[in-house]
Amino acid sequence: AQSVAQPEDQVNVAEGNPLTVKCTYSVSGNPYLFWYVQYPNRGLQFLLKYITGDNLVKGSYGFEAEFNKSQTSFHLKKPSALVSDSALYFCAVRDLHISYNTDKLIFGTGTRLQVFP
Amino acid sequence: DGGITQSPKYLFRKEGQNVTLSCEQNLNHDAMYWYRQDPGQGLRLIYYSQIVNDFQKGDIAEGYSVSREKKESFPLTVTSAQKNPTAFYLCASNRDRNTGELFFGEGSRLTVL
């Protein structure tokens, strides 16, 4: 079964410093991977996705993610954190089975990013 | 503007009552989803529908029911059989059938007293 793991419940970083939010995955076949962000009492907003191609994926708000097949990881990164980046971040993997007519995203447990001024 | 509208935003109900959460989209997306969010547990899939008049159980379907009579609408009923219904409920639609990317509504917070 497809799954993702976010090993850190919370990540703290000072404004201006680089940030990394970790995600590892377990899939059969080629992974379709996603990052979403959630602000308090709001829905999830799409940040970026990896489908194929370059291992470094660029997304919204200056975020990027690095796909590493050998380490089965898809870490979210940003070179310089902003206080406004403070939010809950979710990694997700696509679970697609044509024969079972299944197409859904499986989410990790989320990582709370706190950026301090 | 296209989007997903979930209503109500906040809902309070007494234990033992059924409640229905509305999800309407004008994005012309075929597939729609309901997720439940609890602190520390991420998002868990309740039900999803790939096409009108068809839907499938997700990982935590017990105590919930859905219908998909129109492409635009995918209401979720939380029944009295759901043992712990207090949660944040998120509706989504499949924005890109090639990749599975989802677009989310703003959520409904249900509190059972």
Image (cartoon, coloured by chain):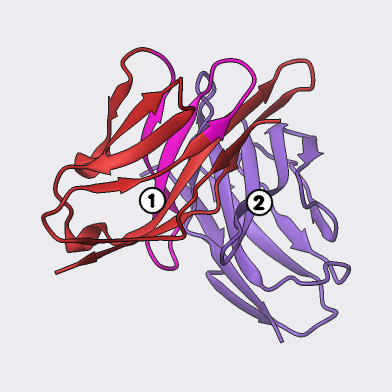
Chain colours: A red, B purple
**Residue A52 horizontal side relative to residue B100, left or right:** left
Q: Chain of mark 2?
A: B
The kind of secondary structure element at disc 1 is strand
Say whether residue A39 is magenta: yes
Magenta region: A25-52
Q: Give residue B7's quadrant in the image.
A: bottom right
The circle on residue B39 is none
Q: Residue furthest left?
A: A16
Q: Residue at x 79, y 38 (%)?
A: B56
Q: What amino acid is at disc 2? A: Arg
- Judge whether A56 appears above or below A64 on screen: above
**Residue B2 horizontal side relative to residue B50, left or right:** left
- Tag 1: Cα neighbours inside 10 Å, few (<14), some, or many (≥20)? many
- Judge whether A51 appears above or below A111 on screen: above
Q: Position of residue A4 (x, y in %)?
A: 56, 39
Q: Position of residue A73 (x, y in %)?
A: 44, 32
User: How far apart in space, not on screen, are marks 2 and 1 (Cα)?
Assistant: 16 Å
Q: Chain of mark 1?
A: A
Can you identify the residue that label 2 sits on? B44
Confirm whether residue A95 shows in the render: yes
Q: Residue furthest right?
A: B81
